[in-house]
Amino acid sequence: MSTAKSSYAVPQWWKEAVIYQVYPSSFQSHPGATSGWGSIKDLTSRLDYLKSLGIDIVWSSPICKSPQADMGYDIADYKQIDPQKRDMKLMVDLVVNHTSNEHPWFLDSRSSRDNSKRDWYVWKKPKSVGADGTPEPPSNWARILGEANSAWNYDETTGEYYLGLFTAEQPDLNWENPVVRTTIWDVMHFWMQRGAAGFRMDVINLISKVPGYPDADIVLGRGHKYQPGLKYFVNGPRLHEYLQEMHREVLSNVGANAGELRMIFIFDVVDIDKPNVRMALKPWDVKEMKSIITHWQRVMIENDGWNSIFIENHDNPRSVTRYADDSDQWRATGAKLLALMQTTLGGTLFVFQGEEIGMRNAPTSWPIEEFEDIESINYWKKCLDLYSEDKEQLAYGRKIIDMKARDHSRTPMQWSPKENAGFCDPNVKPWMRVIDDYKTVNVEAQMTANDPTNLSVWQFWQRALRDRKERAEVFVYGDFDELDPADPKIYAYTRTSESGEKWLVVLNFSGEEIQWTMPSGIEVEFWPCSNYTKQHVEKPKKSTIPLRPWEGILGKCK
């Protein structure tokens, strides 16, 4: 195939940029601080580090004033930094589907039914009131961060329910109100005038709800009164209208042909093990993962779109645990395999803090009390309420937390082998426990590693990012073709520039040694990259290629 003539392959700075997501609470706490929390000031102290890795843009999770019910995604003031100002460009994480219940807008809105800001939020009367005076929510929608609870929250003062899809502390804004939209445009202008390089719009695809808020289908099992209402608020009927208005009023000349946004996060890979709700499991395999990635690579090329490349963020577990093998034997190899895949896919690349050193999930030996996230707390409470006498179900619930809790990505950044991993002073208790492997898995050790034959995970990322930028016409903008889609363990594909330069990527997503047969018509000139060695790797140039467990190789084709 060849890349169609479109804007897909037209160079743009934001397409080639590498974006690094920082979770400020867990990134760095400055010397002398006693809180055990990171801050924006401490983020700026690590800018040289990020530059040396190859990062172009810093995306910080919310830095606005917040009571921290959902770790900053419950904003109480869109124009105040929490707690300090910063003097640098960054990508702002803007949360405008909902606010904090402590935001002045909501405090006004809930004060009375006739307040001028009442319709800034979604308020509805009870569906019914029982004989005992107990009200029923307007619909059966479940909370996203605790499906045992209703997404509707009753307000005793005014006798109505407000919608809070995520938590009671995060009431949803009413985007049907044009005054709300105008006020949000003002917030965006505020940040752009202060040098923001762009916005990451949190759950922006939830801002339009289906009118009437109908009951959701019954999909959850026993004991679940409330049900996922996703089809009534994800990609709702007025979403494109709202985004086009945002583009006209704020983001002029920013979006693609639709005049909306430049790219969206497609969660198909990180949701690969998700059935109806996030804190649940379904089986998946490598073929499914391959088909998802290939599908979106081709869709964007053929439809003048643009991909966001990521497999980690603040809402998902660590990728090496999820998609590879995080054992001591294979953690580094698996982390480099995933780095090779991401740095050779078309789209804008996002790296999450700690991914560049192969941080893994918290160990299964941690007591449940170590998990701090509101979703984990709500989920475990549900498990105890429903299955207190069922040891098997409780064990399964704990397995889900061990595999999928958001806490895994929010543990403190592991900077050094010093106490508390260099995240905060040794005599300070960090807000969340540091993962126990920090003495061997840390930035300092990996940056200074001097293995004559192999690269550390950090060094591999650094080299891969450099190579991606040097060959952007291939790895950022090039055509994409999958090879051998039926293979259950090998993901192989070619990237081809408009000038005809072709590269082959072969990834063994298994802990086994495999002999992979290269399709006829493809011949490699040399193999400059492997996650097993820092030098060129010796492999056959055609026909059958031996691959070691979790091995990834990159070849220049003839």
Image: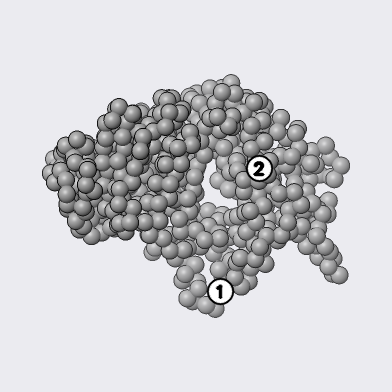
Residue beneath disc 2: 207
Q: Residue at x 80, y 42 (%)?
A: 118
What is the secondary structure assignment of the residue under circle 1? helix
Secondary structure state at the residue bearing disc 2: loop
Task: Give residue 438's position: percent from left, percent from top.
Answer: 32, 49
* Mark 2: amino acid: Ile
Q: Earlier in the sequence, mark 1 or mark 2?
A: 2
Does the rendering let one see residue 233? yes
In terms of image quadrants, where is residue 42?
A: top left
Q: Nearer the viewer, mark 1 or mark 2?
A: 2
Q: How many marks?
A: 2
Badge 1: residue crowd in 10 Å (few <14, some 14–19, many ≥20): some
Residue 8: quadrant of the picture = top left
Question: With 13 as the anchor, is 117 left or right in this view?
Answer: right
Specify the label residue 214 is tagged with: none
Q: Choose between 554 and 178: the one closer to the eye.
A: 554
Relative height, residue 3 to residue 160 (above, below): above
In the foreground, 213 or 523: 523
Q: Position of residue 141 (x, y in %)?
A: 68, 58
Comparing 285 with 461, the one in front is 285
Q: Is residue 336 visible?
A: no
Residue type indicated by callout 1: Tyr
Q: Residue at x 82, y 62 (%)?
A: 128
* Residue carrying label 1: 387
Circle 2 Cα neighbour tier, 10 Å, few/some/many (<14 / 14–19 / ≥20): many
Q: Quadrant of the N terminus?
A: top left
The relative height of residue 186 versus residue 513 in the rendered view (above or below) is above
Q: Is residue 492 left or right of residue 250?
A: left
Task: Indicate the position of residue 443 as horizontal and vertical percent values.
Answer: 31, 41
Q: CA distance from mark 1 to mark 2?
A: 35 Å
Q: Residue at x 50, y 71 (%)?
A: 394
